[in-house]
Image (tube, rainbow, N blue to C red):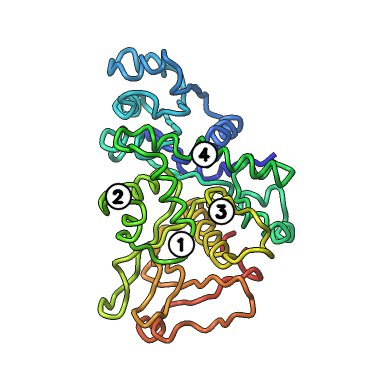
Amino acid sequence: MYTRYCEPLDARMMPNKVLVIYGARRVGKTTLLRQYLNQTAFKYKLDSGDNIRTQQILSSQDFGQILSYVEGYDLLAIDEAQNIPNIGIALKIIVDQAPGIRVIVTGSSSFELAGQVGEPLTGRKMTLNLYPMAQSELLSVYNRFELRENLADFLIYGSYPEVLQATTHNARIEILTEIANAYLLKDVLALDRIKSSRTLLDLLKLLAFQVGSEVVLTELATQLGINVKTVHRYLDILEKAFVIYRLGGFSRNLRKEVTNKSKYYFVDNGIRNALIAQFNGVDQRNDLGALWENFMVTERQKYRSYLPLHANVYFWRTYQQQEIDLIEEHSGRLAGYEFKWSASKGSRPPAGWMETYENAEYQVINPDNYLEFIL
């Protein structure tokens, strides 16, 4: 059994505050919520946004009805809260009027739920983005040696909980294909502004072949037969739906450094491979460098999110083709990380990086030292 990491919830549960857990479908939000409730000492009420009666009560904006609903409880937990109309206003009433109460809600569609809870809960909420299983969570099942032994599987199949529990190659492919085709875009396609699931899937396939490379929106628009504004909007929605993850260019010297382009990574390697139907082993891949880079960027994102480590993140490239895969800027410090699948590749930083940022750190991350970077 793969358990989700509950410690981030303990640190974020505050009286008269709402903790909002965002994440894609099937990453384990409900599992995490139930695991936390099983160990908490608070007297709690667990409900679902799918419950029609709950929708009626919490969307009523009736103070008396809403406060009676939570009376006597220390903690209110609502799964799939995005299904409740005006949920943000209801949660504001609860945390403002019920002394000491703690509230935790989950939502699979961040852009939809964020739109409902954002303004009403200004100053009253904390958020946690939940991803497919992090390597740190898998330490409850594997030791470090075993994580390294299973690295090839993580690169190919990713780390959705259901995929990790599958025992055969075909079962993993079936689950990933189902998630990619049936669940991944369910919330996105519910939006009135999204007219074509085929265009979205084609866009994701184009991004899958460009992992680690700078993306040119005009080229994507031409290939898809849509305008650049639509491409930009689709990318933004896919990022908010936890399908892809964007890195922008870093610069403090605009003449030499590229800043007007972005790189896109997939939140899960398995989903990326499912979209292009490519599940060959690592010894049969011509995209191993891209797989490794995607894996490291996303695992480091999980690490920062769960710790938490607040940092601005970028990639770095000059017009002279010097580049670094990941830049982290935090506490007034700069650190550059280059991801190399081959441990024999050189570890010297680009000359332009050290000349421009004398006190910056630099490290090459490879299969020999990667665990220290993400655990």
| Mark nearer the N terminus (2 vs 4) | 4
Above or below residue 233? Residue 122 is above
Q: Is residue 294 above or below residue 126?
A: below
Q: Secondary structure at mark 3?
A: helix
Look at discs 2 and 3 and give the one toward the viewer.
Answer: 2
Q: Earlier in the sequence, mark 1 or mark 3?
A: 1
Image spot of residue 157 (x, y percent): 63, 51
Q: Are marks 4 and 3 in contact (CB under 8 Å)?
A: no
- Residues at marks 1 and 3, CA–CA distance in whole angstroms: 13 Å
Q: Residue at x 54, y 37 (%)?
A: 26
Q: Secondary structure at mark 4?
A: helix
Mark 2: which secondary structure?
loop
Label located before the other in sequence (4 or 1): 4
Relative placement, left or right, of 258 versus 276 is left
Q: Are marks 1 and 3 in contact (CB under 8 Å)?
A: no
| Amino acid carrying mark 4 in the image | Asn
Residue beneath the point at 28% across and 15% down: 62
**Residue 249 locus on image (x, y percent):** 35, 68
What residue lies at 50% left-to-right and 36% top-to-bottom? 183
Tag of residue 90: none
Residue that label 3 marks: 269
Q: Specify whether residue 19 is in view.
A: no
Mark positioned earlier in the residue sequence (2 or 1): 1
Which x, y percent locates residue 197? Answer: 41, 39
**Between residues 186 and 198, which one lies in front from this camera angle?**
198
Q: Which residue is mark 2?
A: 226
The C terminus - image quarter: bottom right
Residue identifier under label 1 = 210
3D distance between C-alphas at marks 4 and 1: 20 Å
Q: Which residue is mark 4?
A: 181
